[in-house]
Image: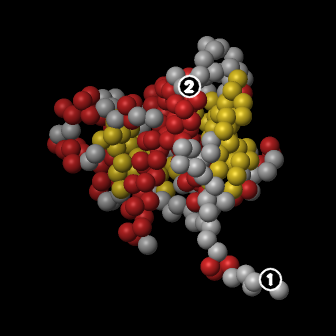
């Protein structure tokens, strides 16, 4: 008679190797490093007990333009088994998507470098989303910016929504026929985290300044991004409090790294509030 099985004593062995933590495998690589036209990169990786989670990076959705998309094509954890169920977010900001595409292109023909890029940037975002299937992030974001930076904030919005966060961006979330000042006030009041993109133009806007000062008055979590060297002389008077904030220069890092920093900062803060 076979021995009785006790699942409480069964050790789970994750699918991975020391040399390739997630068993990343490039399945398709078309058009990268070619200056124009369509391109796509398809790879699979293993996470915990699921083998062959499939992810695609491509500009196909936008007819070969500079905007590109990260798509989860297959993942049992997320209930994605067909093209109708694909989950994705778009890199809408030209500068952000150009920088990331350059990093990918620099890795073409260098399998280990490409695998490392995917392991450090794309895979952690997907695994974060998988972990959030057990509990949804509770924080909501107000995205404060000047109009010229809207594509960048739309890209951050897409990434945060991909992870499950609630966001407020004037372009899409401003109620129709709403009083502008009243709508902005309510949106700041209802957010948990105030994400702000600082530059010289930001401090030239009465609306932007009012949003930031009101968020401070309400005690909101403020996450500031920008080039400190460009704005340091503007951090005086009412805005001197920003000198005590870590103003992160996102231009020097991968967009995906910045997104992870935002998520990690909120995750650690959220644990303190539970």
Residue 138 in percent (x, y) is at 51, 63
Residue identified by numbered label 1: 2
The answer, for residue 207, to whether it is visible in the render is no
Up the image or down, 242 lies above or below 108; here it is below
Query: For residue 32, which numbered disc appears in the image?
Result: none
**Cα separation between marks 2 and 1:** 50 Å
* Residue drawn at x 49%, y 56% as measured from the top left: 140
Residue at image position (69%, 27%) is 29
Asked if 247 appears above or below 270 in the picture, the reply is above
Q: Give coordinates of residue 166: x percent, y percent.
A: 54, 54
Q: Secondary structure at mark 2?
A: loop
Is 144 or 232 nearer to us in this picture?
A: 232
The x, y position of residue 55, in whole percent, is 67, 41
Residue drawn at (63%, 14%) of the image = 34
Q: Is residue 185 left or right of residue 240?
A: right
- Say which of 209 and 38 sits in front: 38
Which residue is at a point 30% across and 29% down the rendered structure image?
200
């Amino acid at each position: 008679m076979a021995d009785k099985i006790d699942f409480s004593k069964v050790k789970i062995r994750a699918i991975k190797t020391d040399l390739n933590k997630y068993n990343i495998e490039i399945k398709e690589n078309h058009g990268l490093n070619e200056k124009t036209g369509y391109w796509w990169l398809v790879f699979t990786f293993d996470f915990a007990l699921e083998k062959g989670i499939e992810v695609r990076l491509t500009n196909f959705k936008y007819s070969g333009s500079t905007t590109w998309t990260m798509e989860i094509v297959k993942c049992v954890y997320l209930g994605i088994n067909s093209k109708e169920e694909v989950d994705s977010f778009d890199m809408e900001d030209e500068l952000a998507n150009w920088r990331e595409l350059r990093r990918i292109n620099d890795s073409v023909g260098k399998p280990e470098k490409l695998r490392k890029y995917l392991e450090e940037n794309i895979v952690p975002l997907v695994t974060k989303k998988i972990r959030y299937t057990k509990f949804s992030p509770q924080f909501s974001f107000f995205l404060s910016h000047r109009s010229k930076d809207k594509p960048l904030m739309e890209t951050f919005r897409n990434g945060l929504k991909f992870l499950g966060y609630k966001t407020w961006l004037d372009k899409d979330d401003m109620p129709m026929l709403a009083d502008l000042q009243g709508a902005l006030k309510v949106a700041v009041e209802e957010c948990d985290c105030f994400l702000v993109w600082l530059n010289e133009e930001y401090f030239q806007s009465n609306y932007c300044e009012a949003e930031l000062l009101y968020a401070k008055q309400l005690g909101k979590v403020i996450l500031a991004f920008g080039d400190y060297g460009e704005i340091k002389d503007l951090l005086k008077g009412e805005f001197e409090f920003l000198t005590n904030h870590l103003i992160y220069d996102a231009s020097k890092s991968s967009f995906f790294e910045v997104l992870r920093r935002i998520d990690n900062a909120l995750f650690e803060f959220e644990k303190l509030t539970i």
